[in-house]
Image (cartoon, helix red, strand yellow):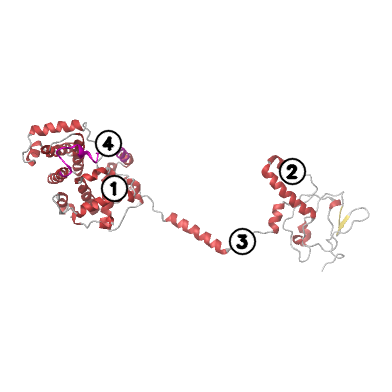
């Protein structure tokens, strides 16, 4: 073990000329002012550890600290009064730095002129009081929480682009379809019919309207007309009855002219007037039909371009990627709703969305309405439930009573026996 006498690296007392001796080398004020790092000296000591936070200091020989005997471990060196004062001063400066930036700048400039360059008090405190590691349980809990959040993000159902497969189909007009249905949604209010317009009718009532619509559905089926024609026919009947008071004996004539106008708007081949006289059992003359046609066109101001439930139904069926069975069942439910006067209180888009939702419940025997359907229809499942419950009730009693035209139509092989599907009674619970 090295002692004070035989250790060559220890600082020895000055000689008569005031020169410090260290081993075989001499250092004095006439030489360059440099001092080896305290860590280099410390490494030569047996069992000593390197000083963790060492900085170079300017050499001031008169104030240089000389230790007699073996140097103590710097890491375990007690805090001197001067060093404690340094820490207190640094803390005060830290508080002053928050309150006044100018004062902080002046204090920093003044500190540069001091004899010694001290280590930042915050670093010394951090070195003396190392941070306590986080307990393993907290680390695992935090990691599990992160994993749960990530899993939720991964399994969040995305909105499917239903028009992506038709990008190369010019008939699908993918570039304009979003704008088209946005326009339909705005124009929906224009085709809205008051749900209590029957109050102004003197000679007819809700039951007579239901009989007329049920009969028109059978005529539409016998003539093999397009689906669009039926929905426009019903819309024209309601819009005309809202504006004009009609006698009971003229109600069937109103229905015939509404179908004639709808055929002229939607069909390629239009039924002739003689055919309409024949199916009315010659209750009206040709003049009666032509006069009613002029009266109806003037009443609705020649406005036939109205969005009906059909345009929304086609769009919403595409969003759920429907098959033929689901499509026919949706049309069955919405045609049942056309007969009922109480369903006029629902907008056309809501009526179409509810038909698709109810048909899905019938096919899959469970509630099924995903985020894609909600995004394209702008209706949540809660908003559809009221209308859907009405449709389930109509489906349940479709084969009973006198108005069974829709049930007979959808009980044929042409329409896939859609009327035989069990109603979704669990929606009524």
Say which residue label 4 marks.
190
Badge 1: how crowded within 10 Å, few (<14), some, or many (20+)?
many
Mark seen at residue 218: none
Mark seen at residue 133: 3
| Residue 132 in which image quadrant | bottom right
The mark that comes first in sequence, 3 or 1, is: 3
Q: Which of marks 2 and 4 is in front?
A: 4
Residue 44 at what x, y percent from top left? 78, 62
Q: Nearer the viewer, residue 117 or 41?
A: 117
Q: Is mark 2 on a helix, strand or loop?
A: helix
Is residue 192 depicted above or below 135 in this figure?
Answer: above
- As measured in the structure, the alpha-carbon distance from the residue carrying label 1 to the one carrying label 2 is 73 Å
Is residue 237 depicted above or below 355 in this figure?
Answer: above
Instruction: Point out the stretch of residues depicted in magenta.
Output: 181-207
Q: What element carries label 1?
A: helix
The mark that comes first in sequence, 1 or 2, is: 2
Mark seen at residue 353: 1
Residue 190: say if magenta.
Answer: yes
Q: Which part of the image, by quadrant, shows the C terminus?
A: bottom left
């Amino acid at each position: 073990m090295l002692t004070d006498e035989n250790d060559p690296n220890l600082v020895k007392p000055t000689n008569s000329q005031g020169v410090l001796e260290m081993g075989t080398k001499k250092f004095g004020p006439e030489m360059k002012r440099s001092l080896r790092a305290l860590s280099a000296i410390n490494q030569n000591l047996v069992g000593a550890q390197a000083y963790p936070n060492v900085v170079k200091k300017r050499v001031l020989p008169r104030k240089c600290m000389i230790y007699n005997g073996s140097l103590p471990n710097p890491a375990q060196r007690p805090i001197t009064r001067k060093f404690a004062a340094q820490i207190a001063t640094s803390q005060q400066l830290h508080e002053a730095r928050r309150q006044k930036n100018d004062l902080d700048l002046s204090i920093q400039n003044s500190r540069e002129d001091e004899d010694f360059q001290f280590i930042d008090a915050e670093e010394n405190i951090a070195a003396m009081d190392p941070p306590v590691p986080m307990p393993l349980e907290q680390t695992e809990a935090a990691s599990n929480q992160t994993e749960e959040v990530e899993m939720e993000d991964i399994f969040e159902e995305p909105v499917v682009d239903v028009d992506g497969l038709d990008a190369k189909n010019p008939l699908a007009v993918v570039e304009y379809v979003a704008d088209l249905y946005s326009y339909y949604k705005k124009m929906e209010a224009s085709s809205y019919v008051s749900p209590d317009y029957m109050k102004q009718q003197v000679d007819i009532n809700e039951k007579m309207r239901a009989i007329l619509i049920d009969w028109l559905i059978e005529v539409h089926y016998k003539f093999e007309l397009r689906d669009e024609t039926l929905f426009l026919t019903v819309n024209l009947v309601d819009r005309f009855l809202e504006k004009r008071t009609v006698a009971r004996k003229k109600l069937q004539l109103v229905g015939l002219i509404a179908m004639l106008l709808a055929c002229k708007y939607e069909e390629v081949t239009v039924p002739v007037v003689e055919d309409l006289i024949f199916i009315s059992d010659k209750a009206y003359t040709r003049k009666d039909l032509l006069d009613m046609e002029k009266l109806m066109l003037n009443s609705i101001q020649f406005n036939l371009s109205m969005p009906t439930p059909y345009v929304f139904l086609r769009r919403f069926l595409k969003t759920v990627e429907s098959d033929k069975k689901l499509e026919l069942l949706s049309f069955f439910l919405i045609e049942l709703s056309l007969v009922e006067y109480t369903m006029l209180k629902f907008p056309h888009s809501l009526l179409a969305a509810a038909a698709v939702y109810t048909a899905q419940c019938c096919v899959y025997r469970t509630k099924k309405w995903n985020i894609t359907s909600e995004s394209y229809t702008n209706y949540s499942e809660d908003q559809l439930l009221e209308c859907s419950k009405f449709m389930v009730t109509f489906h349940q009693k479709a084969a009973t009573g006198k108005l069974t035209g829709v049930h007979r139509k959808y009980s044929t092989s042409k329409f896939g026996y859609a009327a035989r599907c069990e109603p979704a009674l669990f929606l009524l619970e």
